[in-house]
Structures are given as structure tokens and as C-alpha cells.
Image (cartoon, coloured by chain):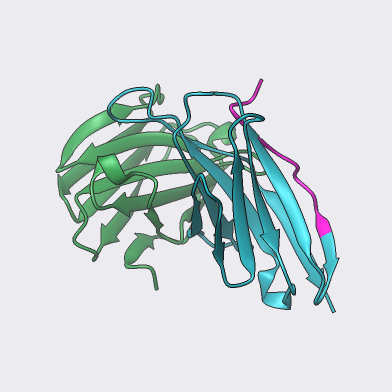
Amino acid sequence: RKEVEQDPGPFNVPEGATVAFNCTYSNSASQSFFWYRQDCRKEPKLLMSVYSSGNEDGRFTAQLNRASQYISLLIRDSKLSDSATYLCVVNDKSDSWGKLQFGAGTQVVVTP
Amino acid sequence: ETGVTQTPRHLVMGMTNKKSLKCEQHLGHNAMYWYKQSAKKPLELMFVYNFKEQTENNSVPSRFSPECPNSSHLFLHLHTLQPEDSALYLCASSQNSHEKEKLFFGSGTQLSVL
């Protein structure tokens, strides 16, 4: 079983619509969670951290469900520029150094 | 511009060649990383350096040899690679290795091994 699993997509989203997708993680000891964004042929960039209480950054909302071991990302009012691959990242911190696990990414394509 | 610069952007090499990838960060960070990204697969951590000391080698074959002369520079020396080593190699930095989640990546080197 993969440590971090994501639906690869693509999620085809009309401009202005809302899209949401999840990421599941296998290690219940995981302590911190993040979403990174990677544009085509570019490097990953930190999009947002995911807090236990959920957090919002503009049109982006991240949620954590510890009981079911998944995090989610919701994008409202999608823009063409939101087209990218969204990487889920989990730090299990099973030791003092922690171990960062990346998902393979969910591709989002926003269409005019 | 992320503050992490990688060269070259693209590299094609034969299995008998020796080449090096270079990474430089201008962020004043103390931890640097090499990651491998193959198509449709998660990023795989290869090496971690914290304050110039290697703190992690993630069972990487010896045909990949890292070098970290100072906290701002990181190299990945390549020799006798295999076609399956073709991938995007990403360098990243963070304030230190305890803040590894907040990574700043370079643009990567797209490597093709023939």
C-alpha cells in the first residue's frame, strides 16, 4: 500500500466552478500535512499547510480528517491559472527528523 | 524565481559518461536536498545535507554521488547511469532539516540516459 495516495485525475473543471479532491495517508502517526502545486514542467511550490481545524487561503480551502486519514483541497471559482498538478505531502515525524512522503499528484485542468 | 538555481536544465548522457548536476541556493538556508521525480510517480528523496553534513542517504545507488562543499551549493555527480535513471532531478532547500516540509525547489534538471 502506498504511504500517500492521490487520484491522478485529470479533473476537468469549467472556469468558475468548484473542484475538490482528497489525499489519503497510511501512517496514523503522521503529524503535519501540506499541499504543493506543480505546474507543467516546473518545480513544486508550497501552496498551503493543512491545519487540524482546517484553513482557507483565498479560493483554496484545506481540510484534515484524522479519523479517516485523509486531507482535502477545495478550489472555488476556478481560474485557468489553477491548472496544475497538486501534490499532497505528509510528514510522519516518526523520529526526530521526520519522513516526508509525497503523493504522485492530482492533475487539475481548468477549461474556458 | 525561487532562489534555488539548478544547472543544467536538460542533460542527455550515455551510460558511460560522467556528468554533474549543480544546485545553488540564495536563501540563506542550511539544509539542501536532492529529489528524483519520475513520470507519474511521487518525488523520491535521495540525499539530505544539513549544515554541509549528509544526514540522509535514501538507499541511493553508488552511481549517484552527492557533494556539498558549503550550505549554499550542492552537486550530484553521475557516472555509469542506467536508462531507468532518466527522470527530473530536483534540488531543494529549507531553513534546516527540521523544517523539511517548507521546501524551496529549483527548476530541476531533466535527465535522459541513452
Q: Quadrant of the N terminus of chain A?
A: top right
**Residue at x 79%, y 49% (from the top left corner):** A9
Residue B94 in percent (x, y) is at 29, 51
Q: Quadrant of the C terminus of chain A?
A: bottom right
Residue A5 in magenta stretch: yes
Residue A85 in percent (x, y) is at 66, 56
**Residue at x 48%, y 30% (from the top left corner):** A30
Of residues B31 and B20, the one nearer the viewer is B31
Q: Is residue A53 positioned above or below A94 on the image?
A: below
**Residue at x 42%, y 40% (from the top left corner):** B17
Res A64 visible: yes
Residue A10 in percent (x, y) is at 80, 54
Residue A37 in percent (x, y) is at 57, 59
Of residues B78 and B69, the one nearer the viewer is B69
Magenta stretch, residue numbers: A1-11
Q: Indicate the quadrant where residue A41 lies.
A: bottom right
Q: Which chain is cyan?
A: A
Q: Is residue A75 left or right of residue A111?
A: left
